[in-house]
Amino acid sequence: EFRLAVAGLLGLDTVISELRKLREDFNRFVELEDRRWEENRRRWEENNKRWEENWRLWEENMKRWEENERRWQEAYRRFEAIEEELRRLREDHNRLREDFNRAYESFMKRMDSFERRLIALGARWGLESEEAFREAMKGIVEEILGAGKVERWRYYDKEGEVLGYPAWVEVDLAIRDGAHVLVEVKASASDSDVVKLWRVGHLYERVVGVKPRLVLVTPFIDERGLEASKRLGVEVYTKT
């Protein structure tokens, strides 16, 4: 019985020792779990902060997107307004161009009419001034000087010597009293007028048998006309 009692005491100490170890292990486990929970709680807090920051950034991005969308809408409305204004300006420009074209056509028609009237007036003035000059020359020669005879010389040039084809040829003034002078009076003259008078002079000489003096009277003659008169022996009387 004593041995059994001693054995029981020894077994109890062992049990108590084991229980103490178990308690220590349990306490260490609890401490470890506490540290783990604390670490997890800290991580959760950090994650929550990150989520809150991410959410804040997301909200800011959403606001930015909304602002950008609003700006895009505003820019699109302005673009539509500009496009509409350009369309209206294009229509106005087309109308103005059409109006300008009509006005230009009307102006050109008026200018053509004015030019025709001006040419007709110039031709009429030229003919009238040439006729007046002939009358003045006739008066000077016949009445004032009392010498010579003034008349129009007309001849049908059937050979076409003057114009290159058969036609009536006339000289504005012919003076015959010993000396024969053929005078061509022109409002304006060029080399073609000089050549024509020279050919008329040759025709006159062939028909009449007298070589005439050739005189061209004009208020204006160009350089080519003057050069032709020098070469062909036509006397030119002009203010230039």
Image (cartoon, helix red, strand yellow):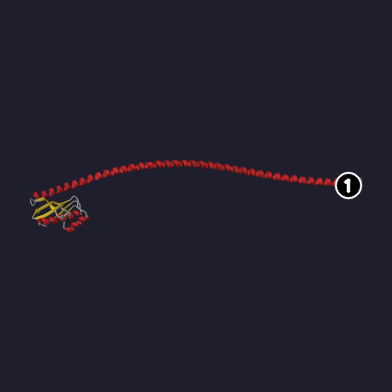
| Callout 1 amino acid | Ala
Residue at (19, 57) in percent of width and height: 228
State whether residue 21 is above or below residue 227.
Answer: above
State whether residue 3 is above or below residue 211.
Answer: above
Q: Which residue is mark 1?
A: 7
Please identify the residue farthest to the bottom as the structure is shown.
231
Residue at (83, 46) in percent of width and height: 15
- Residue sitting nearer the eye, 162 or 218: 162
Q: Position of residue 168 (x, y in %)?
A: 14, 51
Q: Position of residue 127 (x, y in %)?
A: 17, 47
Res 58 → quadrant: top right
Res 41 → quadrant: top right
Q: Quadrant of the N terminus?
A: top right
Q: Position of residue 167 (x, y in %)?
A: 15, 52
Q: Would you say 240 lies left or right of 40 here?
A: left
Number of numbered markers:
1
Residue at (64, 44) in percent of width and height: 47
Q: Would you say 56 lies left or right of 28 here?
A: left
Q: Would you say 52 lies left or right of 127 here?
A: right
- Residue sitting nearer the eye, 51 or 1: 1
Tell me the element at label 1.
helix
Label 1 environment density (alpha carbons within 10 Å; few <14, some 14–19, many ≥20): few
Residue at (66, 43) in percent of width and height: 44
Q: Would you say 162 lies left or right of 89 here?
A: left
